[in-house]
Image (cartoon, rainbow, N blue to C red):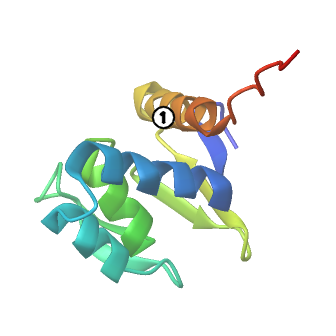
């Protein structure tokens, strides 16, 4: 795959879902709708950024989560049961946005260091 692609793992997906919850709230319509979707198979959808363009074949839950975070990934390839190879041939910015969210979420998950008690 070209350099404008990378492997989106389940763990990275969890970070994306957490980010939707953090930005919109877990009681929000956006978060609740996202949670009602699944990634069991790729489904055809209209490209929300280019309605007159071609239909995209996407995992519904992950695609919706990225859409509400305003991250457009036009190309998806299912990679067994472990994740997706995602591509953004025209620009790297959407892939960097995913990497930034994952890094930030991972940093928030680091447990605080135990305080020394002497």
| Dot 1 crowding, Cα within 10 Å, few <14, some 14–19, many 20+ | some
Residue at (55%, 57%) from the top-left corner?
A: 14
Q: Choose top left, top right, bottom left or bottom right for residue 28.
A: bottom left
Residue at (33%, 51%) from the top-left corner?
A: 20
- Among all residues in the image, which is located at the extreme left? 52
- Among all residues in the image, which is located at the extreme right? 118
Query: x%, y% of residue 18?
Result: 44, 52
**Residue toward you, 16 or 109:** 109
Residue on which the image places disc 1: 101
User: Is residue 9 in view?
Assistant: no
**Residue toward you, 52 or 67:** 67
Query: x%, y% of residue 88?
Result: 46, 40
**Residue toward you, 57 or 21:** 21
User: Which quadrant holds the C terminus?
Assistant: top right
SS for callout 1: helix
Vertical relation: 15 (above or below) 89: below
Horizontally, residue 46 falls left or right of residue 2, namely left
Horizontally, residue 8 falls left or right of residue 74, namely right
Residue at (68%, 34%) from the top-left corner?
A: 110
Residue at (21%, 50%) from the top-left corner?
A: 24
């Amino acid at each position: 795959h070209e350099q404008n692609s990378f492997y989106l793992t389940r763990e990275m997906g969890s970070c994306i879902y957490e980010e939707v919850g953090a930005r919109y709230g877990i009681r929000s319509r956006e978060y609740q709708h996202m949670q009602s979707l699944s990634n069991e198979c790729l489904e055809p959808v209209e490209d929300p950024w280019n309605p007159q363009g071609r239909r995209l074949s996407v995992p519904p839950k992950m695609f919706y989560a990225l859409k509400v975070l305003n991250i457009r990934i036009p190309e998806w390839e299912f990679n067994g049961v472990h994740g997706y190879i995602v591509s953004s041939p025209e620009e790297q910015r959407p892939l960097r946005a995913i990497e930034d969210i994952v890094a930030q979420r991972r940093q928030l998950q680091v447990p605080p260091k135990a305080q020394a008690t002497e």
